[in-house]
Amino acid sequence: MSFPLSSLFSSSSLLDAHGWDSGWAADFAPHAAQGLIPGRVVRVDRGQCDIATAEGVIRADTAFVTPHDPLRVVCTGDWAAVDPEGADPRYVRACLPRRTAFARSTSSKRSEGQILAANVDHAVITVSLAVELDLGRIERFLALAWESGAQPTVVLSKADLVPDPVGLSYLVEDVETVAPGVQVLPVSSATGEGVDVLAATIAGGTTVLLGVSGAGKSTLANTLVGEDVMDVQAARDVDGKGRHTTTTRNLFVLPGGGVLIDTPGLRGVGLWDAEAGVGQVFSEIEELAGDCRFHDCAHESEPGCAVTAAIDDGSLPVRRLESYRKLIRENRRIVAKTDARVRSEMLKEWKRMGAGGKAQMEFKRQGRIG
């Protein structure tokens, strides 16, 4: 794989260009004492990875860092301790503790977690304007982004396909309603609209591009990096869906500072222990819930519920509450698979709901008999 813009950096500054700082240096000190060298993982293949070191990009084996936990496997964005020059083959001996990690649940029936990118500062959720907006999917991406510890930004790509400024502004407003505290940027790689603003927003940190196939991530990556580092294919005209052009996660140095991780298109966006992230996305509901009469209010038919009152007066859209409930339920199911306490609480709740339903049916039956 070619290493874009590497000629701009001498070997002594290559680590800095990839985000090396005094904090990482301190974390690496014990490994340095063992004669190992630091590097950042820029790409992972099966059993092998490319790592940017002070001497350049090297190939290393990951046999010594393959834990059973899929959330702890070597991932693009990790900082690693690697065998020094002269070793053959060279191995990754350890990974430094992550500052942040973007994870989701897999689509497998085992509901395992999958790490998508490590040590990320900015999560750019790319949404194509070539197809109808899916606000629910955007909320899912935002929940995962907030939970990861990264600052999310929503990019409405292919903005040139909406030439009417008023129509475009309405689309931006629609997304802003489901993305409190998040910058929403219309961007066009074809015309350059919004590219400078986005580049300034993500400069100096590590950014991950996220989205479904056909969202325009690879085109956006090429635009931000300043050269064709990713292959691009056209989306299907019939439904706007793209083909999986990107099959691995790749890390590139940005000309304005910082690095960019491009990821394959995600078919599924399953939550993974993202309760805090969901709360951040639906902050207006969480704030309203604080005014409910009962602290354990389910926001359904309880008296004194501030959330349902907001639904009644029109200040809270019904779709938002339904989406909130759906993500909370999904997240609890995922957490319950590994947390016995949560499983117990859910079981009690199901029994209580079942008993309530039976009592209501008995009441109706007795009323009919009487």
Image (cartoon, rainbow, N blue to C red):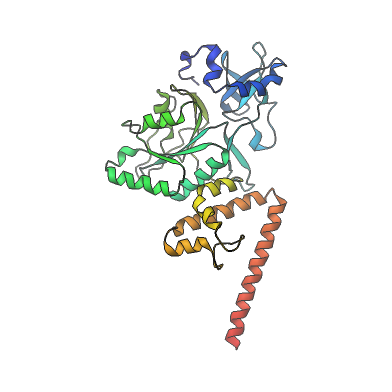
**Residue nearest the viewer, comparing 315 with 121:** 315
Residue ID at (27%, 41%): 163
Q: Is residue 246 left or right of residue 44?
A: left
Residue 23 vertical position relative to residue 330 in the rendered view, above or below:
above
Q: Position of residue 162 (x, y in %)?
A: 30, 42
Q: Position of residue 287 (x, y in %)?
A: 53, 53
Q: Position of residue 210 (x, y in %)?
A: 48, 37
Residue ID at (33%, 48%): 170
**Residue nearest the viewer, comparing 155 with 134:** 155
- Residue 354, by quadrant, is bottom right
Residue ID at (62%, 31%): 98
Q: Residue furthest bottom?
A: 370
Res. 97 visible in picture: yes
The quarter in which the C terminus is drawn is bottom right
- Residue 51, by quadrant, is top right
Residue 347 vertical position relative to residue 98 in the rendered view, above or below:
below
Res. 282 visible in picture: no
